[in-house]
Image (spheres, rainbow, N blue to C red):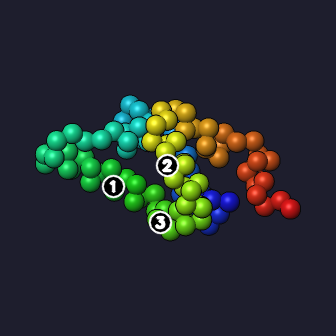
Amino acid sequence: MLVDGLTSRQIEAIDALLVVDAELGVMPLAWLRDAAGAPTARNLATLLKRLKFVRDIGVGAELADRIHPHRFRQLAREGAVAPSFRLSDYSLRRRPRDDRHAADRP
């Protein structure tokens, strides 16, 4: 399963990307996807804040190696065009308990 090896804190942080944050006023994922405009100092500072936010989750890029490259590209394409609220369907907390470990079954 893709989340195998992640800590509960990391999984919770990823799931929290799909819940409206009171401080941001939107889902953190929507905030992260909102591209900065012109290359100004303010926009660069905002970009660095977003980068820190993602890095603080602590998921390494090697996680992508667990997914077949074609499937990874498909997920990236879907994620790029889907509104943030639709992506909550991918959340572990939204899946039935039995589906969470379906890959572990014979």
Cα gap from disc 1 to disc 2, whole angstroms = 18 Å
Q: For the residue carrying disc 1, how many other residues have a C-alpha within 10 Å: few (<14), some (14-19), or many (20+)? A: few
| Disc 1: which residue | 51
In the picture, measured across the screen, residue 51 lies left or right of residue 94, that is left
The structure residue drawn at horizontal position 76% and vertical position 48%, both measured from the top left corner, is 99
Q: Earlier in the sequence, mark 1 or mark 2?
A: 1
From the viewer's side, name the closer residue of 22 and 55: 55
What's the mark number on residue 60?
3
Q: Secondary structure at mark 2?
A: helix
Query: Would you say residue 23 is visible in this rendering?
Result: no
Q: Which residue reaches farthest front?
A: 70
The structure residue drawn at horizontal position 61% and vertical position 43%, both measured from the top left corner, is 90
| Disc 2: which residue | 76
Position of the C terminus, as image quadrant, is: bottom right
Position of the N terminus, as image quadrant, is: bottom right
Residue 6 percent coordinates (x, y): 59, 63
Q: For the residue carrying disc 2, how many other residues have a C-alpha within 10 Å: few (<14), some (14-19), or many (20+)? A: few
Say what amino acid the circle numbered 1 marks: Leu
